[in-house]
Image: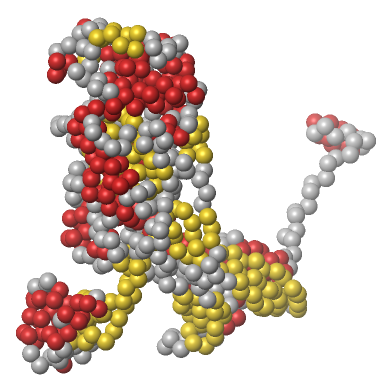
Amino acid sequence: MKQLMFLVVTVFLLLAGCGILPGDSATPTPAATPTPITFAEDTARAFLKAWSEGDYNAMYQMLAPSRQETTSVDQFVSRYKGIATEATITSVKPTVTSVHEEGNEAEVKFSVTLETVAAGTLKQDNAMLLRRENNRWGVLWNPGLIFTQLSSGGTVHLTPLASARADIFDRKGRPLTQPQELTIVEVVPVEMKNENAVLSTLARVFGMQAAAIKAMYSKYPGDWRTPIGTLTADQVKANLDALNQPGIHIDNTKDTRTYPNGTLAAHAIGYVGQISAEQLAQLQMQGYREGDLIGQSGLELWGEPYLAGQRGGRLDILTSSGAITATLANIPAKQSQSVHTTLDIDVQQLVEKALGDHIGAAIVMDISNGNILAMASHPTFDPNRLSQRMSAADWRAILNNPGDPLINRAAQSAFPPGSVFKIVSYSAALEKGGLSSNTLFSDPTGYWDGLGQSNRKYNWTWPITGKGLGTMTLSSALTQSDDVVFYQVGQKLDKIDRNLMPNFARAFGLGANTGFELAESAGNVPDPNAGLWRPGDPINLVIGQGDLLASPLQIVDMLAAVANGGTLYEPHIVARISSIADGSEKVFPPKVRGKLPVSAATLASIRQALLRVTTDSKGTAYSAFRGSKITVAGKTGTAEVFKTGEPHSWFAGYAPADNPKIAVVVIAEHGGEGSTTAAPILREIVEKYFALGK
């Protein structure tokens, strides 16, 4: 009895220690969660969902183990990726239509819609077999789950279909590009009766070494045709007798891109070249293939979607021998479209002639809409040469040319604008600086010690005369480009608000892309809030020096706005796109990107000061324009550079001054004073432009 009581008490104490007393309900231990039963449909839907998301590794994990034994993950992923790329598939949308499951076997029927770039929309009905292996459902995969026609093997092959490349025209419809049929000159060594005679002929015709020509065909079987080069119809005609000998064949042709005006407007037009590996990686899904010609710069690059049209294609299933077993789609290419520019060949020719061999750029713009009538950059290049296959050595020679001939200096390069920027500084002074055009300033010595004698700043006249320009109004200081006056203006404006001048610079279109169709530089407007803003920074900025950079395109756009009443247009070079197929057009109207932050009175004051630059004996460009039949208003600029050599020479203006039609900018790198180099070039451009009857 005592033992029984002892047992009862012991149990009671144990229960109490566990917090469980009579009347309490103990929390039951949860049973193990059973493994959910996976249905074949779940696996099939997950497999199709992963396909639609391009998650091929996840798809592979859902294959039945027996299929994973025969197909590695790399083979599986490579198969899907390769077909997606070849067929230019951009989206996969599968839908399950029915499910039949019986024991360890199942069939899931589905439909799939595949969107492709080259072959349009593809729709197929298909069936997926599944089996329960190792206690899970797995897909009994074969390539027929991608396209049913692959069930018996084979590969997917796209034959791209492309329309002929459309052309680029000037504003009057004159061609800037043209197609040309070239004759391919080929040799068959076993047919040669006199190899030395063949080599001598081809060496003369192509300007090559005979040994180099022989090396081209020696690495192939003697009965193969080996292409040596191409000739135009005129070249074939001129050399027909010499080419008419055993072993030389001229019965094959190829179409190519030519530029009938040679180097004219080369930077604006651009050139085509064989697609690079990097470009192919981006464009292969659009139907491009190795060896295709594609726009590489200028309008050829910008207009690629129009000029090349949209590629179509025939999508086939091929056997290992290349025989077609099925055609999945056959979509014709969409017709290419011509690009009609704002360029004028006549104006372009006179601008390039005036610029000559000066390293630099020149632009002519219609002030009423931002149309680019001419855009020249020197040194230049011949797009005909670049559009043909070039040797690695020739290409390196162009890339390593210190003159950077491939750079469009008119838009892609940015320079200190020098005193041309004083137009902006003058505007800020009148609008926000509490100054007027008649405010008097003094420059008795030709230098300024506003930052201390150790930081003395000089006027441009001091090295010439050893003195300043005396007392003058602010308007006269703009006309005479007096640096000492503008040093004082810059210091005053910076004290009012250090953001004042930078903000005006941006409002005049500097420091940002203009919206131009082709590659351009945004330049740079220094930001006082981005770092240390030193007392000398606004002094440099006010005369267009320091960290301020502007492209010639930005400067001519700014002058056009001054000339037209204050409207800042997006510069543009494309007028319209026209369809070769149906004649329809897409017109690109002018776009306004801003208004100059000045009143009508300030604008009138600027224009009066710029007119005196060329017509007043004290104007910095008076000598350059004396006697001109066309009155030009403008501003000189002499921009110092932190390299050895002369400063950059600028002149930017518009004409006729009393009824402006065009704005023009000229920059000659390291050309010296703006008045001595750039200004005479601009005068020649303006006079010859209006002599055309424009």
Where is residue 556 shown, x and y percent of the image? Answer: 37, 37
Residue under the point 69% across and 74% down: 110
Quarter of the image for residue 683 reads: top left
Residue 443 position (above or below residue 277) = above
Name the residue located 42 percent from the left edge and 13 percent from the top edge. 436
Left or right: where 444 falls relative to 587: left
Would you place residue 467 above or below residue 499 in this image?
above
Does the rendering let one see residue 149? yes
Specify the quadrant that holds the N terminus: top right
Q: Nearer the viewer, residue 312 or 56?
A: 312
Comparing 598 with 188, the one in front is: 598
Residue at screen point 71% across, 66% down: 42
- Please tell me which residue lies in front, 469 or 433: 469
Place of residue 625 in the rendered image (x, y in percent of width and height, measured from the top left): 24, 32
Side of 206 where 361 appears, left or right? right
Is 166 situated above or below 233? above
Q: Position of residue 343 (x, y in %)?
A: 38, 52
Count of numbered tags = 0
The quadrant in which residue 54 appears is bottom right
